[in-house]
Image (cartoon, rainbow, N blue to C red):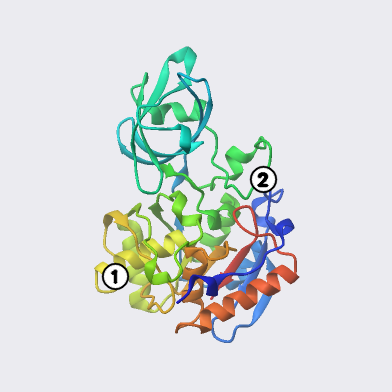
Amino acid sequence: MRTADFDYVLPPELIAQQPVPKRDESRLLVLSRADGRIEHRKFRDLLDFLRTGDVLVLNNSRVIPARLRGLNAKSRGKFEVFLLEENALNDWWCLMRPGKNARIGTPIILCESRKICATVVEVNGEGHRRLKFSGTPDISRELDSMGEIPLPPYIERECQLPDDKERYQTVFAQPAGSVAAPTAGLHFTEALLDEIRERGVKVCFVTLHVGLGTFQPVKAETLAMHKMHEERFEVGEETVRAVNEAKSAGRRVIAVGTTAVRVLESVAAKNTGKLNVYNGKTNIFIFPPFRFQIVDALLTNFHLPCSTLLMLVSAFAAPGETRGRKMVLSAYAEAIQERYRFFSYGDAMLIS
């Protein structure tokens, strides 16, 4: 399949620049996989589409304040450092701007008063810089005081809002490690999750630490040429038991977000269609056609053109190479006409 098949035109004003006042006040587009029928609802109406015995699986990874500001120790030129992946203690792959000035050996001052610094020690084929940090036992522990929440580049504001640190984080976030939010989970409040549990729905969690590559458009001409990034994930015993029991009993598993889908289907692919306790990495690339073994319904946001997320959603919407893509792009066209808000701080979509 061609990457261009997943392109669409989005009016820039529909890219949400800030969240709605309350998390669960977003809109919800509901797409039926059976016949392509569309309903326009509010996010709280999700309750109307849940059944007793359903299992709702959410990604509980916490976003780290991954954006740092630094100075070239020699020229005093400014750097923006975006942490991507931890290799070892005080050893990270990073995205740096301006990259052309971040050559191997470049010394970077991150906090002059505390003598926290970094040095570029390697550059990979993607242009990412490997940094070794010094002046602190663990740079991860300094991020809350030094770092900024890494809002996506399509949120074009001169500065962050006071509540970005809270709102670009799910209310159930626990283990830290993501450099981008699992955005489908941003719509939930603790009160709404309690209501869902009261309806007899089992709420459980997986952890997938979201990398920057998740949200980037595919640059290869065909999907077969695209190399998917790896992301760390973990599935615990409680979720394994809940999901396997639901599948055995013919009850539904509803994934919240494409990251939860990737975890569930990655493990199922390794374990003859069932879950088991697992801790590792996945680079699964889900695009049409794909046989889903675990997920029965998907709650997600609206995704960027030509992104792996849009390809995953298209694969889920319907079997075959083209039907799901056409169905999803048609739903996106209607969402644009109805002035839905797109991307991380935008509205939601339920495909069931």
The residue depicted at 62 percent of the width and 69 percent of the height is 8
Above or below — where is 90 with respect to 205? above
Q: Quadrant of residue 148?
A: top right
Q: How many marks?
A: 2
Residue 80 location (% of width, % of height): 52, 33
Q: Earlier in the sequence, mark 2 or mark 1?
A: 2
Give the residue type at disc 2: Glu
Q: Quadrant of residue 87?
A: top left
Residue 82 location (% of width, % of height): 47, 38
Above or below — where is 175 with respect to 162? below
Q: Residues within 10 Å of mark 1 (few under 14, many from 20)?
A: some
Q: Quadrant of residue 326?
A: bottom right
Residue 301 location (% of width, % of height): 58, 62
Residue 339 in sight in this render:
yes
State the quadrant of the N terminus: bottom left
Residue placed under numbered mark 1 in the picture: 269
Residue placed under numbered mark 2 in the picture: 156
Q: Is residue 87 left or right of residue 168?
A: left
The residue depicted at 48 percent of the width and 12 percent of the height is 113
Above or below — where is 155 with respect to 199? above
Q: Which residue of the protein is positioned furthest toward the bottom in this rendering? A: 35
- Depth check: give the residue in front, 56 or 170: 170
- Depth check: give the residue in front, 55 or 112: 112
Give the residue type at disc 1: Ala
Above or below — where is 178 with respect to 7? above
At mark 2, the secondary structure is: loop
Foreground mark, 2 or 1, reads: 2
